[in-house]
């Protein structure tokens, strides 16, 4: 089990009606006026916006609203929000939405104090301070509600890059599973695939880390079982709650303790998919690339993958487990190939170029250009 | 799955040699002089003291040393340390030891600002502030290194009571599994039993909380497997590391998420054992009372206990699982009855009185005097 530092100061209020608890956290942090960052407006139809406004009014906190953050959030939108946050002199960011909104909120909170926030994403600058961030989660997927990561797309350069900092963990997050009861099945599945992918990024890094692997086995099985239940009955509140907390644990430090920071090749590759095709959802893209990555890697060294096959899929070898994994993804109505994602074969060279911009791809096993090309062919 | 708030701001540096990381945390917190709280002196023989002093000297932090904190730590000793902390005007507490030392450190940190710290334990006062606490763990058992709980014994009244506060989470904790390589097998076992008991206090509270139950199944199995390995080879560093992190997770909020705060009857009862007989180790006492509690409760409603039997012990019913659990405890050289703990039958009435001082016993199912008496007879 490898050395690690675990640190996660986000306070999570989990459960139906827990949004009322956020008022005390905002007050304790001395917030007077927040930037309420949101997406396209679905929160106006499912009660989340009304609950949020009621909570802010109870706490006596003013707000300026910033709408229109989209899936695969962009640097351009973040720059617009930073300007607004400065003009309005807010003292906190309140993200009400999914991973895109929360990731954007983190970039705004840090960018508030920087000349150019993209320099943090491109590794040229460090975050020294940030406005306090609070979040009300509306879809369980990225884990952004309880970590210090953010991923943005620079549309101009087609780069979808990430950053992480201890300073952008949300101070407090509300995870109310009832807020997700009206999600379309497709989004529930995308969230589940994203969460599974986060676990898999860590899973194969150290077979000695039994405690983390055991937790990760259990999280994967819970996510699969709860997603199955939600596709049968989207109003299954117990399944919704269990899926929500599993997705948070999938990327809050617990699933990766002792796992050398994870591999992340699949995330790097998927980020290139959606940089090229912003309409591809992150979770669906991961559902295509991860089985291919496992297939590719297991040919080199099947041992650790066979452990996964047994523990998660109750199969004796990786090939059978991959068959079950892909069948599950297909049964969930999600793509199992690049072709199904809408990527054409003549786009593969550009995709390869976008992926190879990263100075290093993969932690489990470093991938060179030929490896990535082979992997893309396998996934095609 | 029940509503809950998860909050755990402790930074954990886990792994061999990680103590050097603590210097930056102490410096960042503005610490100039700490009270180094410790036990009987074993840390002078296993290198922990030397590493701690080297770390403090690197950081340029002065210290005053306070030795002699014993197992089942006492209010009297805590009062002595509070006086010392005031006289020496320290600005932090550095606990170097196991749960007793860290629990005492928490009481000292809060008591520094209070007239009588026992009023917090007896529920008459609340903690409003505390000195910052840092910890170097030397035995994995209580989970105190990553939570806000403390248990003290008031020797005068024979009360062993606990308290919890967000203000006494250690700011940073070092868990170096190598520091535990010279532990006697008995102490490894006591720690494992304590950790298992923490998980069991939550486990039966809500069968709908699949995600938490799955994690708890996995933690129990990891603790059992790693303890077996350590009894065969105390220098098995991988087993030591996995046991250590499992024990931390057993009481840092993860194992109890959505579990209504847990039951805690067994802890209340065991605290009375060791208040009466301070030589009884907490873990060993729990190893006696928990199987009896499960046996007692399963007669009322076997369903949830049968789930545990299958998931953790791969047995079809609770009776068979309990047989396996008790056989394991026996194989580990630990007591399986009150008699083996050294409690005599004529002490049972006094024990019962000490237990019944609690205003409420148990959360899963509230125990009255007759229940506790029946449970003690079952455990005798």
Image: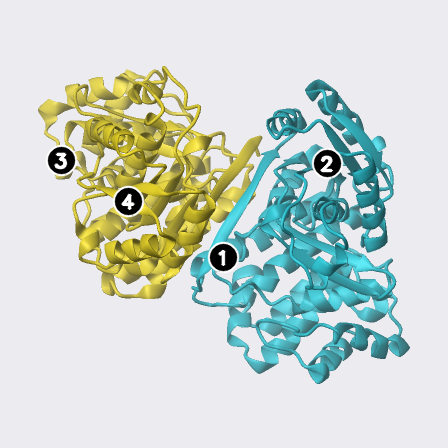
Chain colours: A cyan, B yellow
Front one among A325 and B4: B4
Q: Chain of mark 4?
A: B
Which mark is drawn over residue B63?
A: 4
Query: Label 3 to label 2, Cα distance in Å?
Result: 58 Å
Q: Secondary structure at mark 4?
A: strand
Near mark 4 (Cα within 10 A), the count class, few <14, some 14-19 or many ≥20, is many
Of discs 2 and 4, which sits in the foreground? 4
Residue under label 3? B339
Of discs 3 and 2, which sits in the foreground? 2
Residue found 29% across the figure and 21% down from its top: B118
Q: Secondary structure at mark 3?
A: helix
Q: Secondary structure at mark 2?
A: strand
Residue under label 2? A94
Q: Is residue B142 visible?
A: no
Front one among A349 and B258: A349
Front one among A189 and B112: B112
Residue A123: give x, y in percent of width and height.
68, 64
Q: Chain of mark 1?
A: A
Query: Label 1 to label 4, Cα distance in Å?
Result: 32 Å
Q: Chain of mark 2?
A: A
Quarter of the image holding residue A31?
Answer: top right
Front one among A228 and B158: B158
In contact (CB < 8 Å): disc 3 and disc 4: no
Quarter of the image holding residue B209?
Answer: top right
Residue under label 1? A257
Query: Label 3 to label 4, Cα distance in Å?
Result: 44 Å
Q: Is residue A299 above or below residue A34?
A: below
In contact (CB < 8 Å): disc 1 and disc 3: no
Badges 2 and 4, same chain = no
């Amino acid at each position: 089990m490898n050395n690690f530092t675990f640190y996660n100061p986000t306070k999570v209020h989990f459960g139906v009606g827990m949004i009322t608890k956020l008022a005390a956290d905002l007050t304790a942090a001395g917030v007077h006026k927040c930037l309420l960052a949101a997406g396209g407006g679905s929160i106006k139809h499912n009660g989340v916006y009304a609950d949020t406004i009621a909570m802010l009014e109870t706490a006596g906190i003013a707000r300026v609203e910033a709408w229109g953050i989209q899936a695969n959030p962009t640097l351009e939108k973040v720059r617009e929000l930073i300007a607004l946050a400065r003009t309005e002199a807010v003292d906190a960011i309140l993200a009400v939405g999914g991973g895109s909104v929360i990731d954007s909120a983190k970039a705004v909170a840090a960018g508030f104090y920087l000349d150019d926030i993209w320099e943090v994403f491109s590794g040229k600058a460090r975050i020294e301070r940030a406005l306090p961030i609070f979040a009300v989660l509306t879809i369980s997927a990225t884990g952004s509600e309880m970590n210090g990561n953010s991923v943005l797309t620079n549309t101009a350069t087609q780069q979808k890059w990430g950053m992480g900092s201890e300073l952008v963990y949300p101070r407090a997050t509300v995870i109310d599973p009832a807020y997700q009861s009206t999600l379309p099945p497709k989004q529930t599945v995308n969230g589940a695939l994203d969460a599974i992918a986060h676990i898999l990024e860590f899973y194969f890094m150290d077979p000695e880390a039994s405690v983390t692997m055991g937790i990760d086995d259990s999280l994967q099985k819970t996510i699969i079982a709860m997603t199955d239940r939600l596709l049968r009955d989207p109003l299954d509140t117990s399944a919704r709650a269990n899926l929500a907390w599993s997705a948070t644990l999938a990327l809050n430090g617990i699933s990766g303790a002792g796992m050398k920071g994870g591999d992340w090749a699949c995330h790097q590759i998927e980020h290139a998919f959606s940089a090229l095709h912003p309409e591809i959802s992150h979770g669906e893209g991961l559902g295509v690339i991860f089985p291919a990555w496992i297939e590719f890697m297991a040919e080199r060294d099947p041992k650790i993958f066979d452990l996964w096959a047994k523990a998660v899929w109750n199969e004796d070898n990786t090939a059978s487990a991959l068959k079950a994994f892909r069948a599950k993804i297909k049964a969930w109505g999600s793509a199992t190939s690049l072709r199904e994602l809408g990527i054409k074969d003549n786009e593969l060279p550009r995709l390869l170029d976008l992926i190879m911009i990263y100075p290093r791809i993969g932690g489990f096993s470093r991938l060179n250009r030929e490896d990535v090309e082979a992997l893309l062919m396998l996934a095609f």
